[in-house]
Image (spheres, coloured by chain):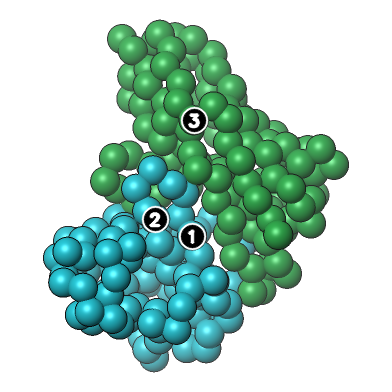
Amino acid sequence: KQEVTQIPAALSVPEGENLVLNCSFTDSAIYNLQWFRQDPGKGLTSLLLIQSSQREQTSGRLNASLDKSSGRSTLYIAASQPGDSATYLCAALHGSGNTGKLIFGQGTTLQVKP
Amino acid sequence: DAGVTQSPTHLIKTRGQQVTLRCSPISGHKSVSWYQQVLGQGPQFIFQYYEKEERGRGNFPDRFSARQFPNYSSELNVNALLLGDSALYLCASSFRPVYNSPLHFGNGTRLTVT
């Protein structure tokens, strides 16, 4: 059974700091891994998607890496800003891709202080 | 273009009642998935539909059912509501079941069961 774990559960940093969010999964047979952002009371916004054959993806100040052999993914946020404050969720797509389902971690709640 | 739209945004029901939640996918998207997110946890997969056929089902009781219409919109039905069904219900759409592109989530329906 695929399990996805995110550490830490909460993180508070001063503005401008670089930070890393961690995600681990138990079953390496994933189709892809996705990172999402969720603001309070809102839906999820997709940030980055890494296919199983890829090692990393970058978008602006965000960089996500994937190491299937160790069952780990990291989301690196450079030069954090107060607007980055949100809950960040990672999710592994488990299955064939045609009928797969996303298995989510519990999220890391990030607070960036001005 | 409009994103994924869900209705209603909030709903209060009593134990034992039935509820129907609605979702309109992004124009051109043929796959719709439903997720349940209990406060403080990551979303959990309920159903996936593609071209009006069920493509996946999570570990939810038979009280939960769904369908997809010819215009690719979808409804999630929950019968005999329990207090534990209180959650944010999220709908997500994609062009195909194969998640080569990120899932697009709506803002969800907040269901409270009293």
Is A109 rendered above or below residue A78?
below
Which element type, helix, strand or loop, lies under badge 2?
A: strand
Mark 1 and mark 2 in contact (Cβ < 8 Å)? Answer: yes
- Residue type of the residue flagged with mark 2: Gln
Circle number at residue B37? 2
User: Which residue position holds label 3?
Assistant: A9
Q: Are marks 3 and 1 on the same chain?
A: no
Q: Chain of mark 2?
A: B
Give the CA separation, mark 3 to mark 1.
18 Å
In this view, the residue in front, B93 or B16, is B16
Q: Colour of chain B?
A: cyan
Crowding around mark 3 (Cα neighbors within 10 Å: few <14, some 14 to 19, many 20+) is: some
> Residue A98: x percent and y percent?
66, 73
**Residue drawn 22% across and 79% down?**
B16
Which element type, helix, strand or loop, lies under badge 1?
A: strand
Q: Which chain is green?
A: A
Q: Is residue A56 visible?
A: no
User: Which residue position holds label 1?
Assistant: B44
Which residue, as the protein is rendered here, is positioned at the far right?
Answer: A69
Q: Chain of mark 3?
A: A
Mark 3 and mark 2 in contact (Cβ < 8 Å)? Answer: no
